[in-house]
Each structure stands twice: as C-alpha cells, then as structure tokens.
Amino acid sequence: ILGALGVGIGFGLQGIVNNFVSGLILLFERPVRVGDTIELSGPSGQGRWAQIKRIGLRSTTIQTFDQADVIIPNADLVSTQVVNWTLSNRLVRLIIPVGVAYGSDVPLAMETLAACAKGQRWVAPTKAPQVLFLGFGESSLDFELRIWTTDADHRLEVLSRINQEIDRRFRELGIEIAFPQRDLHLRSVDASA
C-alpha cells in the first residue's frame, strides 16, 4: 500500500517538479526577463503578445496588451516556442503590403510609399524605408513597404499612422488602392432577361 501511495504521489508531483526545474532554467539561462515583450505559440498562448511581469519558481505571470494577467506554468515557456521580441534589442521590422490599381504610375507609388514612412514617430531614422514591387496580383500591382520601428511595443501605432498617411497621400495624388474585381462573361442568357 505504501509503495502504491508513493507511486501515486510521485505521479502527482511530476508536474510541480517539472515546473520547478523549468523555473530554475528560466532564472539561470534568462531566455526571457521581466519587462520583455514576447509572443507565445504554445497551448497557453496561441499567438498572444504579452509582457513578462514576474518569473517565479513554479509559474510566470505575463500581461497581455489588453491588461489581462495570465499565469503560465514554467514548463510551457521552456518546452514550447516563445518569440522574444526584446531580448537583444527593441527594433522590429514591419512589412506593410499595399495593392495599387493597374495603370497606376509605379515609380510615383514607390516614392510615395517611402515618403509616408519618413519622419514618422517610432520609425528608426538610421534604417531607410524599403519599397519593393513584388508582382502582378489578380486585381492589383503588389508592393511592400518595409520599415524598422525603434520600439516593439509601438509597432501597431506605427502601422496605423503609416496606413493613414498612405491613404491620405494616395488620395491627393490620385493613386487608387486596388480592390478585388471580377469580370463576368455570360454565354447564354434567356431572351426575357
């Protein structure tokens, strides 16, 4: 009976011991630190962005950008993939896809896209924006504006400002942002229609 009880307790403590050892790994290896911005992809996160608030021996507390505190077992942080956006620096590259209508002036569109990113708050001044003409889509000429932000925490704010600036300048210059269009060819139509 004591042997069976010992095995049962051993299985019951297995998760706690696993989280404790994982907590020691997190505290000594430091793949994540308090204040880091991370993206979780395991069962606890599903692509959630959050900031590390506290690392304990058994669990880690993170805070999402919606201000929700989430307690994650340390074993999840050690055994699943975690993207740490701020471990070595806070620079983050943003890729903004833009589709322009066929017939648009390609060089003007590229110059305008680059100008929309220059001088924006949180855009890295040392890395010039890059505009790429990637191809001919179904309904658009496909471009990408690639920029670097100086702080990962402000990437969505930068994205919003640049999208607004692109829309404003394209309207001023008469450059049409493409939308899906379909041509319908009718072969046989009832005479009454």
Image (cartoon, rainbow, N blue to C red):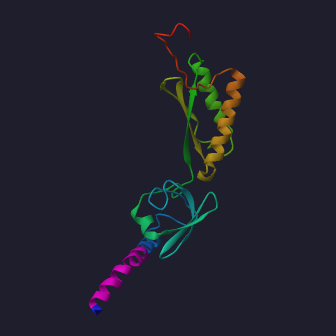
The answer to which of 77 and 35 lies nearer the viewer is: 77
The spot of residue 187 in percent (x, y) is 46, 10
Give the vertical position of 193 relative to 22 (above or below). above
For residue 165, side relative to residue 43 (left or right): right
Give the vertical position of 73 relative to 184 (above or below). below
Would you identify the image quadrant in which residue 74 lies?
Answer: bottom left
Quadrant occupied by the C terminus: top right
The spot of residue 13 in percent (x, y) is 38, 80
For residue 104, side relative to residue 6 (left or right): right
Would you identify the image quadrant in which residue 64 lies?
Answer: bottom right
The answer to which of 34 and 1 lies nearer the viewer is: 1
Q: Does the magenta stretch include residue 9?
A: yes
Residue at the extreme top of the image, as rendered: 191
The spot of residue 115 in percent (x, y) is 65, 31
Q: Does the magenta stretch include residue 135?
A: no
Q: Name the residue located 42 percent from the left edge and 69 percent from the top edge.
A: 75
The answer to which of 25 and 60 lies nearer the viewer is: 60
How many marks are shown on the rendered structure?
0
Residue at the extreme bottom of the image, as rendered: 2
Magenta residues, as a range? Answer: 3-21
Q: Name the residue located 56 percent from the left edge and 49 percent from the top edge.
A: 91
Give the vertical position of 178 relative to 96 (above or below). above
Quadrant occupied by the N terminus: bottom left
For residue 88, side relative to residue 170 (left or right): left
The spot of residue 93 in percent (x, y) is 54, 44
The answer to which of 188 and 36 lies nearer the viewer is: 188
Give the vertical position of 3 relative to 85 (above or below). below
Main structural element of the magenta stretch: helix, strand or loop?
helix
